[in-house]
Image: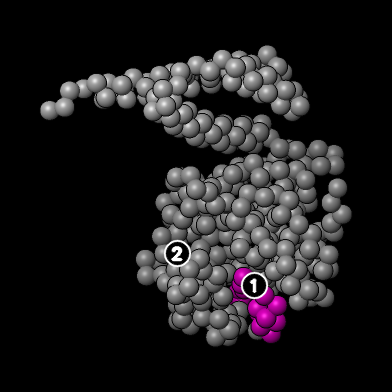
C-alpha cells in the first residue's frame, strides 16, 4: 500500500539504541541557557539536543523564538559537548538556515504536518540532503494526513525518517494537553512497520508530573524513543514551562524505564501479550470516554423532552437505532447479537438518565417558592 524507502537513522559515530532519547529546551532563549542546558544533558549521557529556534504560536505576541540568532548557539553546543542538534523547520528558509549552521536533524511540527502545501515546501527544500527528518503527527487525529506528510518527505529522497507521536488536540476536558490516542500511532506501526516512532510526552502531557508514566507507556508499546523537553531552570522557561524538566529529572525518568523485548518471528516483529493487553487498556479507556460523552448528550435530550413535553421513550426512534447499529456493526465484522446486547444496555442507561433529568426538573418546577 505504501511504497516507502525508509532506512534506519544514523548519526556519525553514534550507535542509536532503543530508547532513542532527544532532549533540550522548548525554546533556545539565550546563549547561556542553551549551552548550560546542553552541558547538563551531555553530562548525563544524552547525545541528541533539541531546541526550538522558530516557534509557531497560537496567537500573535507570544514568544516565537529567537530565530536564526540562536543557530550559532547550537553550533557551539556541537563544538563544546559533541552532541548532535535538532530543530523544528516550517519553511524552506528554516531548512536553508539550519543546514548552513550544521544542524544534524530536523523535525516538522504538528501545525506544519497538517498542511500539505507547507510539508511540500519543506520537502522541496530538503531534497538532495543527507539528513534525518522527524515528522510530528498533525494536530488533528488524521492518520492519512500524517502518512501523507511522511510520504512527501520520502519522495524528496529522504530515507532516514521517523514519526513523532505528540498527541492530538481535543475539545474534551482531559488531564492531557493533547490526548495521546495511542491507537493512531499503533495503527501507523501496523501500516509502516519499518518506520521508527518517537513519543513526545512533553506535548502530550503539558504537565511534567505525567512524563514518567507516558514515557513508560510508549516503551510498553514498543515505540523507539522519546523526545522530552528539558531546561536548566524549567519554572523560568519563556515557553511551555509546566511541561519541562531539569536534566537531572530526565535522567531519573530514563533510568527507571522498563524495556520489554518483543518476541521476534522469523521475518517480522510480533508484539508480546503484555503489549496487546496494553493496547486493550488504551482502547477501553477511549470507550469509557465515549460513553461518558454519549450520556451527557442523553441528559441534554432528557432536558429538551421535558421542556417540550415529549415522552421519554420514542419506540420508532429506538427501532431505527437498533437496526442501524446492527447493520453498521455487521459491516465491521461484529456479531449482531453482540451489538444488540451492547446497545440495549446503552439505551437502558440513556432512558434512566433522561428519566432522572425529568424527575429533577419536575420536582424543581413543583417546589413551592419561598
- On the image, the x and y values in percent for residue 6 come to 81, 58
Q: Are marks 2 and 1 in contact (CB under 8 Å)?
A: no
- On the image, the x and y values in percent for residue 17 come to 68, 57
Q: Is residue 116 left or right of residue 274?
A: right
Q: Give the camera-side residue of 189 and 350.
A: 350
Quarter containing the C terminus: top left
Give the structural element (helix, strand or loop) at label 2. loop
Q: Give the camera-side residue of 24 and 96.
A: 96
**As drawn, which residue projects farthest toward the front?**
308
Give the structural element (helix, strand or loop) at label 1. loop
**As drawn, which residue projects farthest toward the left?**
370
Q: Earlier in the sequence, mark 2 or mark 1?
A: 1
Which stretch is magenta?
Answer: 81-100
Q: Is residue 342 left or right of residue 262?
A: left
Q: Is residue 306 visible?
A: yes
Residue 21 on the magenta segment: no
Can you identify the residue that label 2 sits on?
Answer: 240
Q: CA distance from mark 2 to mark 1?
A: 19 Å
Can you identify the residue that label 1 sits on?
Answer: 89
Seen at 61% across and 76% down, the residue is 82
Characterize the local packing of mark 1: few (<14), some (14-19) or many (20 or more) Cα atoms within 10 angstroms: many
Amino acid at each position: 500500500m505504501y511504497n516507502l524507502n525508509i532506512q534506519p537513522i544514523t548519526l556519525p559515530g553514534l550507535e542509536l539504541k532503543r530508547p532513542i532519547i532527544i532532549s533540550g529546551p522548548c525554546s533556545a532563549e539565550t546563549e547561556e541557557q542553551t549551552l548550560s542546558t546542553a552541558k547538563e544533558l551531555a553530562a548525563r549521557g544524552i547525545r541528541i539536543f533539541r531546541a526550538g529556534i522558530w516557534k509557531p504560536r497560537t496567537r500573535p505576541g507570544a514568544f516565537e523564538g529567537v530565530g536564526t540568532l540562536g543557530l550559532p548557539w547550537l553550533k557551539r553546543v556541537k563544538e563544546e559537548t559533541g552532541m548532535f542538534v535538532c530543530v523544528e523547520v516550517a519553511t524552506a528558509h528554516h531548512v536553508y538556515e539550519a543546514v548552513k549552521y550544521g544542524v544534524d536533524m530536523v523535525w516538522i511540527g504538528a501545525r506544519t504536518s497538517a498542511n500539505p502545501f507547507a510539508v511540500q515546501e519543506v520537502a522541496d527544500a530538503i531534497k538532495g540532503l543527507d539528513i534525518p527528518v522527524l515528522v510530528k503527527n498533525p494536530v488533528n487525529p488524521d492518520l492519512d494526513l500524517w502518512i501523507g506528510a511522511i510520504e512527501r518527505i520520502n519522495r524528496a529522497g529522504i530515507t532516514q525518517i521517523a514519526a513523532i507521536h505528540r498527541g492530538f488536540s481535543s475539545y474534551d476536558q482531559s488531564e492531557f494537553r493533547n490526548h495521546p490516542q495511542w491507537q493512531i500511532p499503533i495503527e501507523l506501526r501496523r501500516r509502516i512497520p519499518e518506520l521508527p516512532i518517537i513519543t513526545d510526552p512533553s506535548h502530550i502531557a503539558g504537565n511534567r508530573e505525567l512524563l514518567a508514566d507516558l514515557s513508560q507507556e510508549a516503551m510498553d508499546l514498543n515505540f523507539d524513543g522519546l523526545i522530552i523537553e528539558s531546561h536548566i531552570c524549567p519554572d523560568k522557561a519563556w515557553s511551555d514551562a509546566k511541561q519541562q524538566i531539569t536534566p537531572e529529572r530526565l535522567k531519573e525518568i530514563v533510568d527507571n524505564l522498563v524495556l520489554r523485548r518483543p518476541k521476534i518471528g522469523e521475518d517480522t516483529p510480533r508484539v508480546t501479550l503484555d503489549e496487546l493487553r496494553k493496547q486493550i487498556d488504551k482502547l477501553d479507556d477511549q470507550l469509557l470516554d465515549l460513553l461518558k460523552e454519549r450520556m451527557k448528550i442523553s441528559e441534554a435530550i432528557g432536558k429538551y423532552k421535558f421542556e417540550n413535553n415529549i415522552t421519554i421513550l420514542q419506540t420508532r426512534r429506538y427501532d431505527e437505532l437498533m437496526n442501524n447499529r446492527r447493520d453498521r456493526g455487521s459491516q465491521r465484522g461484529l456479531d449482531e447479537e453482540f451489538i444488540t446486547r451492547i446497545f440495549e444496555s446503552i439505551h437502558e442507561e440513556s432512558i434512566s438518565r433522561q428519566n432522572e433529568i425529568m424527575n429533577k426538573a419536575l420536582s424543581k418546577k413543583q417546589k413551592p417558592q419561598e
